[in-house]
Amino acid sequence: MSSSISRGLLILAGLCSVVPGSQAKDLEEMDGSVHDHEHHEYLVCQNIFDNVIDFTINLYQEPASWSETTNVLLSPVSIMAAFAILSLGTKGDTHMQILDSLKFNLREMSEAHMHQCFQLLHHIFQHPDHQLQLTMGNRLFISDNLLLMDQFVQDVKELYHSEVIPISFRDTRFASKQISYYVEKETNGEIVDLVKDLEEDTDLILVNYISFHGKWADQLQAEYTAEEDFYVDEDTTISVPIIRRLGAFFLGRDEELSSWVLVQHSVGDVIAFFILPDPGKMRQLEEGLTQEHFNNLLGTIDKRFARIHFPRLSMSAAYDLRSILSTLGITKIFSDEADLSGVTGEASIRLSTVVHKAMLTLDERETETVSTPQFDDRAWSNAPIIKFNRPFFLLIREESTKIPLFVGKVLNPTQQ
């Protein structure tokens, strides 16, 4: 190597794909889907799950304030899981800074408890009884000329069902292809060409990926697509495919946030919140987002007939998270003072880059009319027409734990 400090790269990827469905389910039924034998474990880990929610809000509010013209899309749980894994190999101030920034207070919980709850989270996401079409994984690729610490390898395997894979970085182009191919295979071809242009002296790469496929379960009378205007801002209007739906939806008006709230659920205990602020009220919405507010939202939502106009949506966003995480307090691991001696005792390694890529697809397939029992014409005459034809906020979460899988803001549904 050309220097005594070798580089580490953290790569995170998320993919969410949701298509329409025809099977209806009430919110109350969904809340009751948690198995009794898991309930105690949920309660024990509730403080950890709450930390993930708090971190989500803090994380979102950083990139959300950067631009008024760029979509925002993040997978908070994948970011937290990746840094929880990294913490297994850090020591000293580097270690404490990561835990503090992730909101893990060791005066209130042990590190073992934190990792056990992430282990439980992995079990929940992968358990077949939940029918959650979600794949989440982590893999650590490390230079084959470094001596790994046995305890770190064992902890990564036992706590996170993951692997530490030796690899040669002497040919960075070939190494990039190897790692990208591995992720492509693990995600069934959905996340491709993830790793590009590796820097010289890279010795460690942590790849985190999350892929979710859902099917909405709403009761629809009709559904079809037409071109409509989408108002990106006061000066920009674009024409986009809009899906017009007639049916019964979980819908409510949040006066505190000056917003309409559409709640949709999919097979497998996943709920999506689509929050449409009044024109010019996006900043008010973002500043008002709190964990308590989200917990109270479902109590204000009623099932009602409505005409929903929603854009056909396929978006992605990529970030170097270093500046965001530095703002949140994670700085040591990016500096020459980084202590990753729990990973390898042979070399000084610092994290040079944290790449996070998230992709979201809603209503990917062509829509069709869905046949359901006819509703009373009087109900339709009073049905509100809610048009998601301007910027809106979204949050997709696993419901039994309230863990956010994806969070974002749609400013332009055609922006890739």
Image (cartoon, rainbow, N blue to C red):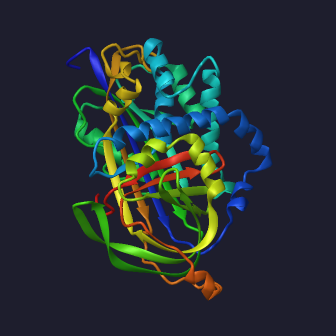
Q: Does residue 230 sit above or below 273 in this rendering?
A: below
State the image coordinates of residue 406 (x, y, percent, origin top left). 47, 49
Residue 264 in sight from this viewpoint: yes
Q: Residue furthest right?
A: 36
Image x and y of residue 224, in percent: 44, 81
- Give the quarter of the image for residue 350: top left
Taking depth in this image into account, of 107 and 131 the one nearest to the observer is 107
Residue at (60%, 41%) from the top-left corner?
292
Taking depth in this image into account, of 85 and 100 the one nearest to the observer is 100
Q: Residue at x 66, y 36 (%)?
A: 46
Residue 118 visible in the current orientation: no
Q: Nearer the viewer, residue 358 or 172?
A: 358
Q: Is residue 49 left or right of residue 99?
A: right
Task: Name the quadrant containing residue 412.
Answer: bottom left
> Foreground residue, 127 or 180?
127
Which residue is the extreme one toward the left? 2
What residue sits 33% from the left and 31% below the top?
A: 322
Residue 13 drawn above or below residue 54: below
Task: Determine which quarter of the picture holds residue 160.
Answer: top right
**Where the N terminus falls, by quadrant?**
top left
The image quadrant where one finds the C terminus is bottom left
The number of numbered badges drawn on the structure is: 0
Q: Give the x, y percent position of residue 43.
A: 72, 37
